[in-house]
Amino acid sequence: FLSSLLSPSPLSLSPLSLHSPSPFSLSSPSPLSSLPPLSLSPLYSPEARSRMDHPFTVVVAIDFGTTSSGYAFSFTQDPEAIHMMRRWEGGDPGVANQKSPTSLLLTPELKFHSFGFAARDNYHDLDPEEAQHWLYFDKFKMKIHSTTDLTMETELEAVSGRKVRAIEVFSHALRFFRVHALKEVKDQSSSLLEGDEVRWVITVPAVWRQPAKQFMREAAYLAGLVSPDTPEQLLIALEPEAASIYCRKLRLHQVIDLSLRPMTNGLSLESDGSRPFDSSFRQAREQLRKARHSRTFLVERGTGELWSEMQTGDRYIVADCGGGTVDLTVHQIEQPQGTLKELYKVSGGPYGAVGVDLAFEAMLCKIFGEDFIESFKAKRPAAWVDLTIAFEARKRTATPGRSNALNISLPFSFIDFYKRYRGQSVETALRKSNMNIVKWSSQGMLRLTPEAMNELFQPTINNIIKHIEELMQRQEVQGVRFLFLVGGFAESPMLQRAAQNALGQTCRIIIPQDVGLTILKGAVLFGLDPTVVRVRRCPLTYGVGVLNRFVEGRHPRDKLLVKEGRDWCTDILDRFVSVDQSVALGEVVRRSYTPARSGQRKIIINIYCSVSDDVVYISDPGVRKCGAITLDLPEALPGTVAGAERREIRATMQFGDTEIKVTAVDMATNQTVRAAIDFLSN
């Protein structure tokens, strides 16, 4: 299960057809014999699963974000107490530093140097010439989302332009969190902890596909969080799901309600029935500031007051607005104290806060020239990082209706470098650009007018609002009562006001006070009870290529294969699951295979996927090979199998979890067969 990389060259195999008298061998791995129709059956009950999941003493969750990351943990004997990580040294003034920037610094020899604020500050202090040899990575998580052919060899480019394998960058970061988290857990634990007593949870965007999830798992193995031999010690949590789990615990005083309709929680209303936007935001910020004196957060034993307003069958949307992506998930309450059901496959896209940063960079390119900006980033990488930090600080203070400009300090090296590069001043460049919404201050600052800030924010915010509106129009999502805005970008008053204006009449818009920590706390709760989301929707159609009896007039002639006097149709897609199909935890798909040759030690079965369910053949447009299942066959016991063609290997696949899993059994001996499913070696 996701723990070992597969051989790039598939061996021959033959599936075992339960409906044909004699299975046959094939020399090619892609066409398989006819298999039973899709059936989902329970592997084990959620109750049994829960019992299996509690040998752990502590759950440690890592929220690996695009712009910032953090960890939290809870002891299983005291699950109502979630301990947040220690505050970091070197935090930005006025910015809560319960999370650390997702920034990594490697030495010129590619050795780990520092992470977070320390990485950023150390990189800043390097001599400009020296900095060109060091490797500084920032906001690198987005690369995993945007890479269509992600493999273990995918590379990341540092600010200086040097490249290194992405898996090494991610494993360095995860190793850093492992060391810090274990030290803090041991400081608070009265007994010595063994490695197998810790369950790890890593958060990923729900829109990530299987290769990206497997990539994070492989990085965790490389970082030493868990061993590939004990994969169950690591859970991959979907970010909006984690937020949804946490929102079940919220009390009324822990939320900001942005709805335009009258509230029912006793808070003051404006004459139009709305909550005073700015005062409620300030009130929540003040409560949050007081709460941060303690790093232990107590959650409700059952569900929070907000949940008491909901009934079985109520539907709500969680919009996780992060740094890199926006994820939307739709949940329905199965029972008030119990489990959740996903109503529609997760959706979203690269509409996170990074979009505002990219818009700022595009604005700089428009003013100073793209060639200059690229040259400055390459020759003065540390100064470029300083400029992005300065913009980040000002971006957080942007509010709708602001009347005065936001000032962003340009590093002296930027001003000096531009004069030598172009032979003219920054002020002249601004004047010539005709961008009236950006001014120049004699103190060495860019003055971004409110119009300029709106221009930077609007494209990203419009994408988010449009995506939520399109989701709410779907038949499966009718009757949504609540919209929860979570994630770091949900802290932005610009996004909050846009959501309030566009959606406030449709449903109640709820923002948890500690919105940037919502996913982290929910990930801990998920690690304590992974069965809380009982039903999920499949994001894709998955299956394998099989052979069926050729039917003249129904099957195309170019799919005809004549074998041993029989006519077969090749390349038919045998579905394991279909896109947007509901699959419950513990439900499985079973298929049986037999080796093509006596003594064969490995079976490799190619997996195909499609965003559509309207496909018949693996050669249809939109169908692609996305992974492979490997079955390592134990040597047959003497006298148990009279030939390869009768040796049945039964594979069991789970699609209802956050990752696709596979197990297998040799039916002749009842021995477990080592089974792995790989999405990274295509």
Image (cartoon, helix red, strand yellow):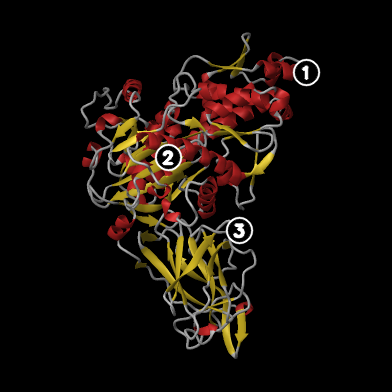
Kindly state the secondary structure of the residue where label 2 is placed.
strand
Amino acid type at image mark 2? Asp
Kindly state the secondary structure of the residue where label 1 is placed.
helix
Furthest toward the front, the residue is 192
Amino acid type at image mark 3? Ser
Residue 462 at least partly seen:
yes
Mark 3 neighbour class, 10 Å CA radius: few under 14, some 14 to 19, many 20 or more: some
Q: Quadrant of residue 627?
A: bottom right
- Residue found at x 48% / y 86%: 639
- In the image: residue 677, left or right of residue 156: left
Amino acid type at image mark 1? Arg
Mark 3 lies on residue: 681
Furthest toward the bottom, the residue is 565
Mark 2 neighbour class, 10 Å CA radius: few under 14, some 14 to 19, many 20 or more: many
What's the CA distance linking mark 3 and mark 1?
A: 48 Å
Q: Earlier in the sequence, mark 2 or mark 3?
A: 2
Which numbered tag is attached to residue 320?
A: 2
Nearer the observer, 548 or 429: 548
Q: Kindly indicate whether the residue at mark 1 contacts the one at mark 3 (C-beta within 8 angstroms).
A: no
Q: Quadrant of residue 113?
A: top right
Tag nearer the camera, 3 or 1? 3
Nearer the observer, 512 or 399: 512
Residue 493, given in percent of the width and then of the height, sits at 42, 26
Q: Kindly indicate whether the residue at mark 1 contacts the one at mark 2 (C-beta within 8 angstroms).
A: no
Q: Earlier in the sequence, mark 2 or mark 1?
A: 2
